[in-house]
Image (cartoon, rainbow, N blue to C red):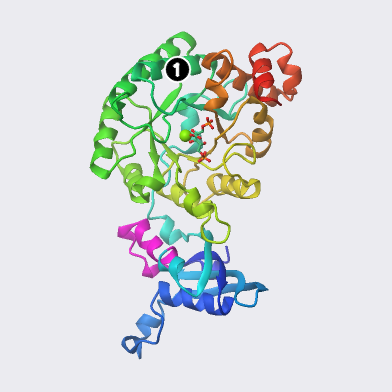
Amino acid sequence: MNEEFKELLIAKYYVEHVKSVEIAAEEICDEESVGTWTDLTTTVGKPHIARLRAEVLDKQVFDDHGDYQSGEVTIGFQTETFDLEAGITSILSMVAGNLFGLGALRNIRWLDVEFPRSIIENFPGPKFGIEGVRKIIGTDKGEFPNRPHIGTIVKPKMGLTAQEWADVTYEAAIGGVDFIKDDENLSDQHFCPLEDRVIHVLERLDQVKEETGRTVIHAVNVTATHDVMWKRIKTALDNGAKCLMIDVILTGYQELAQMARDPSVKVPIHVHRTMHAAFTRNQKHGISMLPVAKIVRMLGGDQLHIGSYGQGKMDTDLELELQLKQSLIEPMYELKTTFPVASGGLYPAKIPNLVKYGGNNVIIQAGGGIHGHPDGTRKGAMAMRQALDATLKGVSLDEYAKDHQELAKALEKWGK
Ligand code: CAP
Ligand code: MG
């Protein structure tokens, strides 16, 4: 970052404006700091107001389309304008507020953000980070220290009873997964109550610990309205939950922020991003996942879904996902890292590429790709671990499958 701008929050936008990129930039600065659509008599002769105005740091015109101009603008917001006690809401009300609805902007997409130290230091960041999560699970050691994690989402998404759900976790854990999570829409339905699920899963995972010595953790989805969510957090923690999960777009960022700050939450927080695509997918309008990832790290998410490095069933963008990974693992002042999660339509044959792009710092999750294995969950988990082992040993999956039946069957079912 350019030192000169260090007390500014710097935000980059793609814009399409009916007149020009230059006017777009000025309109954003006015609307999102001390101006509006017209001159104001209330600001005349008041330099203490003028100095709070957002600044245009850069602008580039891409094209003239006749009835609009497209380009990119970089805006510097004065950090003094943010009410940091109000947290991320105050920041978003300016950096990602009215600007999305300005009529002369046909489209506007928030592409990236750089938070200066004076903002970052108001946020705790992850309590555990990649290193802390590894210590809990024990993957900081072993045959391949600091290897990628294999995770699973129990499938079907819903319908299993708490005991059935827990029995599936036992099979997955015995088969070799490191991490198990609730699906984004499983919370506390009557057929699978959260408290029963937590209790039964812990019994089964304790059994795995006794039998194999391995620690496998379950992220309990506590997503709900504020009061209900806190009741669920307490229920989960009182019963010994080792990880919590939140659908951060559904609850709002503040709920993650509060959860991460709360001293009673002494377990990692897994952050699911369901509904993000409603505003991240359109390449011309909305918000890129990149600012979302940086915010989640700053607020304290220990693990975050970032996409499948071009491999899975969800809309994917390899270049962006590589940037997302960097934003979670590269130094960001004193903040700990956030573990990037690749998920959605993954199965063993995808692992070599996931490791190629994700490196060691990736949680590779498979729901269907484990529980859809022809011989069941345990073999499905084994196949995933075999694909990972082969990859880490530098052996092709075809070769490894010759004496690893579970992998062979997965390759046969889903292809290579
Ligand atoms: C994956 C998953 C995750 C998606 C979310 C699902 O299941 O549980 O929610 O990965 O997308 O419900 O689709 P499968 P993203 O392994 O069976 O596909 O990770 O991109 O946020
Ligand atoms: Mg899911």
> Residue at the spot x=46%, y=22% of the render?
216
Residue 376 at x, y percent in the picture? 54, 14
Q: Quadrant of residue 47?
A: bottom left
Q: Main secondary structure of the magenta part?
A: helix
* Residue 384 seen in this snapshot: yes
Q: Is residue 397 above or below residue 186?
A: above
Residue 401 at x, y percent in the picture? 71, 16
**Front one among 2 and 391:** 391
Q: The disc labelled 1 sits on which kind of residue?
A: Val
Please state if 100 lies on the left or on the right of 384 as rendered.
Answer: left
Taking the view exactly as shown, the residue that stands out farthest to the top is 211
Q: Is residue 95 magenta?
A: yes
Which quadrant would the C terminus be assigned to in this image?
top right
Q: Quadrant of residue 53?
A: bottom left
Crowd around label 1: few <14 · some 14–19 · many ≥20 (10 Å) = many
Element under disc 1: helix
The stretch of residues the image draws in magenta is: 78-96
Q: Is residue 351 above or below residue 96?
A: above
Please state if 72 lies on the left or on the right of 198 as rendered.
Answer: right
> Residue at the spot x=47%, y=77% of the render?
27
Question: What residue is pinned by disc 1?
Answer: 168
Q: Is residue 302 magenta?
A: no
Residue 4 at x, y percent in the picture? 54, 71
Residue 70 at x, y percent in the picture? 61, 71
Please state if 145 lies on the left or on the right of 192 as rendered.
Answer: right
* Residue 140 seen in this snapshot: no
> Residue at the spot x=63%, y=72% of the render?
60
Which quadrant would the N terminus be assigned to in this image?
bottom right
Please state if 192 lies on the left or on the right of 340 as rendered.
Answer: left
**Front one among 101 and 44:** 101
